[in-house]
Image: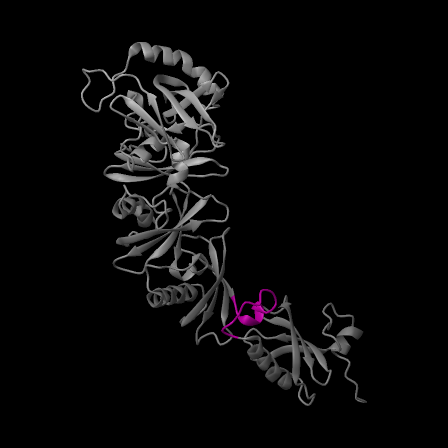
Amino acid sequence: MKISFDFKKMVQRVQTLAIALGLATLASAGTQAAYAAPKKAEAAPAGEFKIDPAVQAKSMADIPAIIALGKIDCDPVDAYLMGPTEFAKDDGTKVKGQLYEVACKTGPGFIITSISPTEVGQAFTCSLAAKLQATRPESILCVLPENKPHYAWLTPIVQPYLPGCQISDARVIGSTSTEPLIDRYEVGCGVQAGGIIDYAQLGAKAPTEFKSCLVVDGTSSACQFTTKEQTMAVLKPVAATADKDCQVNNVRFVGVNKENDGLFYEFGCANKPGFMVMTKLDNTFERNITCASAAGLGGCKFTDAGVAAADANGTYSALLGKAGFPCTVTDYNVVGTQEQTKRDYVEFKCKEQPWGLIGFVPQPGSTASVRVNDCFIDQTSRKNCTFVTEAQLRAQIDKLIKIAQPGKDCDVSDVRYIGESDGIEGAVIVEIACSNKRGYIAIVAANRNSIADSTPCKIAKSHNDPVQCTIAGNGTYSSAD
């Protein structure tokens, strides 16, 4: 959704209506035209508009039909005929009409021009009028009590999103020109954090949506009425749930999850490495995400990468050791995340595990268990190891097959990793191809320092073994070759 605010286009939309000292003037696309407004009562203080009850009553009788013609969803609680007006339409045709202000039971108040019993001009909200008047002091403002201040209607709208908000200020930021047609408002709530409300334009149908000021930080919609400290105050309970020891000194919005039902935030801590969290759309805590696991979210910005890595190394080392995998982690690589179990798929580097470790480790708060294997097992399925390469694994198998099949001159040219052995815990079944076309189905022992069994491809075929050689040309060795 693109929110824009083009002053010239807004002038056209609002028709640059102006009112001053009992006379109103109008400019459409730069064209000025005068019209007569209701005479200002002499007893009224300067700057105050006096409501004529007779005009008000007649206006309330006229306005339902005008609203219906404009296809605006409004249950009018007040209306007032502001006076005649004249303006140029998009095609340059000049038309005359009657200018009405309307206050609605719910939703924004607005000004609309009745041109004839079958035609109305484009309506514009009191908030848009206030936006224009800020830069054009002569411009018209809404005068009905229900429309003052211009943002009074927003109070019930923001309560579900900002409970207890006493609106101290509000402004219209901009509007969309394509579906969904919305006006974007910023709402300030005094001592508490405000936010952004997207609300349907007059005559349009669009859902009302709320956004935290963090979501629009750094954009053209950035909040002006809410401070960073106020926003952090709202989210500090979320940080406390994730890590009660964190002294929050920064927070930022990271993004929305792929299901569009959760939000990601990063927290900086003054006393320790920071972290990310995932919340529901109402900012209810869902889960903690360490900076080590946040690469897929663009990584942490408030925590130095070296500090985050050192912290993660210690955490991972303790986690693996407790699960029975001694590993003083010196490096790691987060491959991905299993959302169902709240576990990360991580590759580890450590001296205690020469053939690497890779697999699932639980995120903070997850009740799932650690499930890791070495890179021999990884080669049977995911093939995600990078610290230990396939070439290194093949070199080890080359060494072991020469011991298991002495005198067979097997220089390993290819290896197919088939799967874990059903009969020997931790062992892995492989197909070995030799450059001289000898081939074997072999079982690499759990300690990876020996081959527990090896069967030539020809014998496996003749015995109709369940596991056969499939590498092209493997096992076709002939003494005549």
Coloring basis for residues: one colour
Residue 259 against residue 455 in the figure, above or below: above
Q: Position of residue 77 (x, y in %)?
A: 36, 17
Task: Tell me the magenta residue range.
Answer: 373-388
The reply, left or right, for residue 43 in relation to residue 113 is left
Q: Position of residue 97 (x, y in %)?
A: 42, 20
Quarter of the rendering containing residue 454? bottom right
Residue at the (57%, 78%) spot, across then down? 391
Residue 408 among those drawn in magenta: no
Q: Position of residue 6 (x, y in %)?
A: 39, 41
Q: Position of residue 227 (x, y in %)?
A: 26, 45
The reply, left or right, for residue 413 in relation to residue 461 is left
Residue at the (75%, 79%) spot, across then down? 475
Report whether residue 450 is seen: no
The reply, left or right, for residue 394 in relation to residue 155 is right
Residue 47 against residue 353 in the figure, above or below: above
Closer to us: 334 or 35: 35
Q: Main secondary structure of the magenta part?
A: loop
Q: How many numbered discs?
A: 0
The reply, left or right, for residue 172 in relation to residue 176 is left
Closer to us: 452 or 448: 448
Residue 314 against residue 223 in the figure, above or below: below
Quarter of the rendering containing residue 456? bottom right
Residue at the (66%, 88%) spot, across then down? 406
Report whether residue 267 is seen: yes
Residue 377 against residue 269 in the figure, above or below: below
Closer to us: 175 or 373: 175
Residue 383 among those drawn in magenta: yes
Quarter of the rendering containing residue 380? bottom right
